[in-house]
Image (spheres, rainbow, N blue to C red):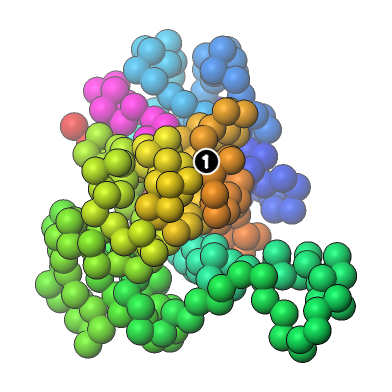
Amino acid sequence: MKIVVLDGYTLNPGDLSWDGLKNLATDFTVYERTAPSEVVARSAGADVLFTNKTVLTAEHFDALPTVKYVGIFATGYNVVDTAAAAKKGVTVTNVPAYSTYSVAQHAFALLLELCLHPQEHSEAVRAGEWAKSIDFSFRKYPLIELQGKTLGIIGFGEIGRKMAEIAYTFGLNVLAYKPNPDANYKHPDFAWVTFDEILEQSDILTLHCPLTPDSQGMINKSALAKMKSSAFLINTARGGLLVEQDVADALNNDKLAGAGLDVLSTEPPAHDNPLLTAKNCIITPHIAWASKEARLRLMVAVIQNLNQFLNGTPINVVSKI
């Protein structure tokens, strides 16, 4: 069985082992990165492909008749044309829930940076600003306490629920929105609300939903106009959930107090992405998922997915007609 990994570097830059996959193959190749123009040549004759962010289109499946399985090194699967794969009899799987703890941790790191500015205060201390102060307590920015405020969570799967658990320890009230709410989730400081209600009532809005045609650009000028001007926006899901120019405009015009983003619509970003110069906008380079612990869970799950497929009992299948 020929297995080709099209972009293995982000999952395993050298601190994990490929042996679990290699042992399943008679021919095993890992490419750190694959350009769009290289996909067909590198995948020729493969039975199994693995991708993280390398896009696989209907044209690729037409050109690669030997491929029977595609494993995605991620939870989101918008990089693969799953409908085209299904029509060609190709099974596509993803890995849900591997990064739950890491992504929730990172989302709160972004939020706490917006609330307390520890990095900027540290840099000010090192620059001598505290030493020059006449007061023992030196503050460059307003400090915000989370207790009693409202966290709105759009998308309430594994990560969204973990966000809620953490939120309660900070004394936050939690609102959640998703198209089909689960009535079984109950907590005294929790409520299901409509999309408009979560925009209007949240002090912090955090996104944990997939990027779909319905959710593309959901945080746009109209949505932002319904939010509190004092609100923070956190996005560790997909950059395409935002209309980035609208978010930048809201930040620059004080219609939104701050944003903490780990994802952008194009990654790496174009130099003229408006969020790169927006006021009070923290951007990290799509690393919320990437702790070593999370990547190890991902590797284990990827191997399990392939083994289940080979045994005739596939799991985590996202290519369904």
**Mark 1, residue position:** 275
Up-down relation of residue 171 to residue 55 (above or below): below
Which stretch did the figure color magenta? 76-90
Residue 240 position by quadrant: top left
Q: Position of residue 54 (x, y in %)?
A: 52, 29
The reply, left or right, for residue 127 in relation to residue 265 is: right
State the residue at coordinates (56%, 12%): 37
Query: Type of residue at label 1?
Result: Leu
State the residue at coordinates (70%, 64%): 120
Residue 69 position by quadrant: top left
Query: Would you say residue 236 is visible in this rendering?
Result: no
State the residue at coordinates (77%, 88%): 136
Q: Is residue 79 magenta?
A: yes
The front one of 58 and 254 is: 254
Up-down relation of residue 66 to residue 143 (above or below): above
**Residue extending furthest front?**
134
Q: Is residue 212 magenta?
A: no
The reply, left or right, for residue 266 in relation to residue 204 is: right
Q: Position of residue 61 (x, y in %)?
A: 38, 18
Location of the C terminus (image quadrant): top left
The reply, left or right, for residue 240 in relation to residue 25 is: left
Query: Would you say residue 280 is visible in this rendering?
Result: yes
Up-down relation of residue 13 to residue 122 (above or below): above
The front one of 298 and 206 is: 206
Crowding around mark 1 (Cα neighbors within 10 Å: few <14, some 14 to 19, many 20+) is many
* Chief SS of the magenta region: loop
Q: Position of residue 82 (x, y in %)?
A: 31, 31
State the residue at coordinates (50%, 66%): 111
Q: Position of residue 264 (x, y in %)?
A: 49, 40
